Amino acid sequence: MKKIIFFNTGWMDFYKGLSEDKLQGGGKYVKVHGDGGETFNFKPFRAKMYGYVMPMRGGAIRLERLGATRVTTELSDTTVVWTATHPNGGGTYIVGWYLFATVYRFSQSFSVSKANRPKEVRADYHASALESDVCLLAKDARTFRVPRREKGAMGQSNVWYADRKADFVDEVLEYIKPYTESGHPLKLKTSSGVKRAHQVDVLKRMEVETKAVERVANHYIALGYEVVSVEKDNVGWDLTASLGKGTLHLEVKGLSGSVLDFEITPNEFRSLQFNKENYRVCVVTDALNAANLSVFSYSEETDFWSDESENVLKFEERIGARAFVK
């Protein structure tokens, strides 16, 4: 059976530090200090990731639960699944994973000299993996719920071995399989310094818009959302996506080229400003071919609209607004 372990931490968008993010949940220490060791769990250092979790009462990771001996201090080729409690709707969800990771019985410290450490202050770590074997899900893609408060499920401890939930483990492995086969999801390559060409072919523009809406709708449906078109209702967005008690307003922008530069109507801009938390600007570039998707969401901490690749939208307000990646 494949070695797999679940580490539960606080919720962040990027896990790359607090300068442009916020740690929500994570226990008493986070409430007191506003920070935690998991803050940098997905920030690479020398092409590797180092992940922190707080074991029960600061104890050790019981590697023997994963098939190791009681004297084993580290275990390689392990899948580490990171989970967190959703800050708004509640419930524990998978936020990402390390593949082919090394898990350590006791917390580890960086052995490099102080001069060679990352600029940010990092905590100790309990797992490490190559950056290429790591995936952090975009926040809208965090829809796989982890069972709690039932026999054999994740309990109060932040470390869960799932050795009594074989069926659930199989579901998780099947869930992450498409990501491991196709690479990190939703990666977007952008161009800069290229003049935007206005799409004068009306029929082609309509085809681009249709393909873009299909791309966005299928993306959210695949994530488990129920998607309804409101394009003809003039509400300030194109699609409404619902999951449980949560609802997202999806404004779709289809582009035939690769440059992130587009217009937002006055109605769309008002809706964007009025309901920032649940509004998404979904941009599909090269819509008739590769159909690359980037989803921009608002962060109250930074006052930025950014996507999963950390591109930031800038708005030039006119009668409506022009949006582009700087």
Image: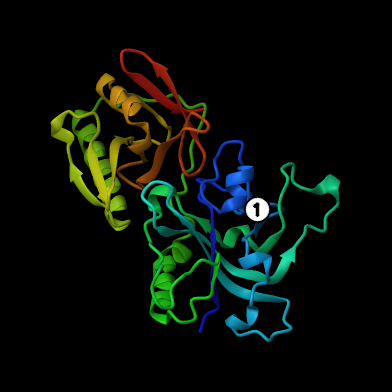
Find disc 1 in the rendering and name its residue.
37
Q: Is residue 16 visible?
A: no
How many residues crowd around disc 1 within 10 Å: few (fewer than 14), some, or many (20 or more)?
many
Up/down of 57 relative to 63, above or below: above
Is 149 displayed left or right of 191 in the figure? Answer: left
Q: Secondary structure at mark 1?
A: helix
Image spot of residue 132 (x, y percent) = 59, 59
Q: Is residue 100 visible?
A: yes
Question: Which residue sits at x=51%, y=84%?
Answer: 1
Is 293 displayed left or right of 33 in the figure? Answer: left
Query: Which amino acid is tagged 1?
Result: Gly
Question: Which residue sits at x=46%, y=54%?
Answer: 137
Question: Which residue sits at x=25%, y=48%?
Answer: 242
Name the one closer to the observer, 106 or 319. 106
Image spot of residue 251 (x, y percent) = 29, 35
Image spot of residue 216 (x, y percent) = 29, 46
Up/down of 100 relative to 95, above or below: below
Image spot of residue 2 (x, y percent) = 52, 80
Residue 9 found in image quarter: bottom right
Q: How is the image coloured?
A: rainbow
Name the one closer to the observer, 106 or 74. 106
Residue reaching furthest to the left: 232
Residue 277 found in image quarter: top left
Name the one closer to the observer, 27 or 43. 27
Up/down of 92 relative to 316, above or below: below
Marks counted in the figure total: 1
